[in-house]
Amino acid sequence: MKKFIQDFKAFATKGNVIDMAVGVVVGGAFGKIVTSLVNDIITPLIGVITGGTSLADKKLVLHAAELAEDGVTVLKPENALTYGMFLQNIIDFLIIALSIFMVIRMIGSIRRRAEEAKKLLHKKQEEEAKQEEPAVPEISSTDQLLIEIRDLLKEKDSTAEEQAKS
């Protein structure tokens, strides 16, 4: 898990062009899913933690709005830092980046496995080629001695037959 986090950190800060290009494509594909995940699942859970308000609605009011006596008409709008939407966008980004990282890591793993399989296949083919070569069996010294005795006996028999014929 530690290596996974280190790899993700390196990926997020490295800015590799190819990885980012893949990220744009995959991010576009995951966009609606991620938005739905954040809006429909994560944000309500954060709302429960933060007291029922949506994360996107979180803000720091610097100056409250001034209303007319009727209580509806806004004379001067409020001035606020709407940090909730910013936090929600950060969550969106992290989910998209994590998804892209997972896809790239999976592709890298598939590439490594393919390379390993290719090397293994090449090694197996080399071994099969070596096995197909006719192997000349080595003859032990005892067998060699017996072969020589046999040949001498054959030679002696053929010489004896020639002498008997003459």
Image (cartoon, helix red, strand yellow):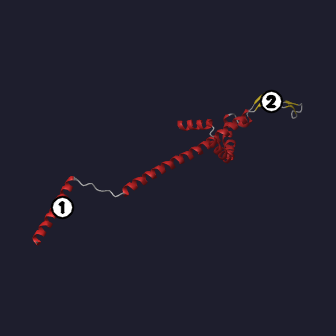
Query: Horizontal and vertical percent for residue 137?
Result: 28, 56
> Which residue occupies 66% across, 42% down?
41
Q: Is residue 165 left or right of residue 34?
A: left
81 relative to 30, above or below: above
Query: Residue 61's mark?
Result: none
- C-alpha span from label 2 to label 1: 114 Å
Query: Horizontal and vertical percent for residue 84?
Result: 72, 34
**Sequence-wise first label, 2 or 1:** 2
Q: Which residue is mark 1?
A: 151
Secondary structure category for the residue under label 2: strand
Q: Nearer the viewer, residue 128 or 14?
A: 128
Q: Is residue 3 left or right of residue 95?
A: left
Q: Quadrant of residue 145?
A: bottom left
Query: Horizontal and vertical percent for residue 60?
Result: 75, 29
Asked if the residue at tag 1 contacts the one at tag 2, i.e. Cβ–Cβ closer than 8 Å, the answer is: no
Residue 129 showing in the rendered view: yes
Query: Horizontal and vertical percent for residue 104?
Result: 59, 44
Q: Nearer the viewer, residue 22 or 50?
A: 22
50 relative to 127, above or below: above
Quadrant of the drawing holding the C terminus: bottom left
At label 2, the amino acid type is: Asn
Residue 53 showing in the rendered view: no
Query: Residue 79's mark?
Result: 2
Q: Nearer the viewer, residue 96 or 54?
A: 96
> Which residue occupies 74% across, 36% down?
57
User: How packed is label 1: few (under 14 Cα within 10 Å), some, or many (20 or more)?
Assistant: few
Q: Tell me the mark number nearer the camera, choosing from 2 and 1.
A: 1
At label 1, the amino acid type is: Asp
> Which residue occupies 20% across, 59% down?
147
User: How packed is label 2: few (under 14 Cα within 10 Å), some, or many (20 or more)?
Assistant: few
Q: Is residue 122 left or right of residue 165?
A: right
